[in-house]
Image (cartoon, rainbow, N blue to C red):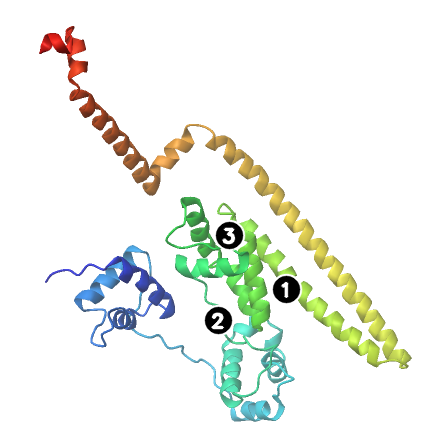
Amino acid sequence: MKEYVLTKEEKERSLSLFEELDGDLNEATKKLFKDEKEKGSTVRGRALRKFWVEKGLSYRTKVKKRVVKHFLTDDEKSFVKQHYCAEMTKKEIGQLLWPKDATHKGFSESDKFIALCEYITAEFPSVVNLRDDAAGEKYTPPHILSTAIKRLNKVAAKEFDALKLNIQDRKCVEKLITYLHAPRFLQVINSYITKQSRELFESEYIRSTWDKPDLTSDELNLYVNVCMDYVNLKEIEQHKQKLNLMFEDAEGQNELTMRLTEMLKTKAEEYNQCINRIDKMLAKLNGERAKRVANQQQRNASIISLVQLFQDEEERKLMIKMAQMQKQVVRKEADEIEKMSDWKARVLGISKEDAI
């Protein structure tokens, strides 16, 4: 049976479909070739599967359904129906239902909480709580260059094109993909229950790390801490605004005014502490990396950089192509000289007229 070869356009489209369909080979094959009879085992399906494997992408042929390990009891459902409203978050309901479980760090990723979120979403489809819009949802990091570049362009004001990246930028984006799969980054971003907090955390993390392909694991953890404090700053500022509004409404209520004043003072101190932590961590990160980059630049100034460049496949192909072009130019000049009768005659020691 003749092997099918994907066109350039089909390859590019297949990478987008991989991200869109979460690696579903059968569905991607149908959409790519616009044929419902196509699947991963057909000739064209095998060609697509081979291309994905070459790109290091993990495909699947069956849809994996999440196994629900916890089901709400009738009493729990009744409690939710009685107390859930737009003013309460899913996490707050979970804290009321399971006060001991809710104190654990991993509660927002637990089967109980996910089951609660699914039940509330199904039971109250029209109730929207902006503080609760990402509860129970898993963050999905990018797996391919095109998706990572879209996120990078959005948050870092870049205009990168996956097909026109230079070698250094490509390495940076490839490294960013691994940074976005770091276990601690995933654990922290999944702990946020609002899309606003998740987007802020992800944006600051991408902006801080994308152009630093040499970060160590410890440095990545410090950048996670910095980005957590950026989210903390936003939340502290929101609390301060609420307290200020309450302070204005409490005019004439001396006891409440005094308590609000103390709370505002505490929030102001928290805000300043947060700013100081960010400044210290960034100073530490920038200082240590600056030394490492300086040492790297000294090494690159030697002949080693040329060897490393030649070891890079794309650069090696470019250098070979340039050498071949130069050789063609020399050969062309030699052919022109070979055709010159005057030049030949002078070499032989006779004039053109004597030769004639």
- Disc with the residue nearer the chain's start (1 vs 3): 3
Q: Secondary structure at mark 3?
A: loop
Residue shown at 33%/56% (left/top)?
56
The residue wearing badge 2 is: 138
Nearer the viewer's eye, disc 2 or disc 1? 1
Nearer to me, 345 or 115: 345
Residue shown at 17%/15% (left/top)?
342
| Cα distance between the residues tagged 2 and 3 | 22 Å
| Cα distance between the residues tagged 1 and 3 | 19 Å
- Disc with the residue nearer the chain's start (2 vs 1): 2
Please indicate whether residue 263 sits to the left or right of residue 282 in the image: right
The residue wearing badge 3 is: 210
Give the residue type at disc 1.
Answer: Val
Nearer the viewer's eye, disc 1 or disc 3? 3
Give the residue type at disc 2.
Answer: Lys
Residue shown at 20%/21% (left/top)?
337
The residue wearing badge 1 is: 231
Please indicate whether residue 99 sits to the left or right of residue 176 in the image: right
Count of numbered labels shown in the rendering: 3
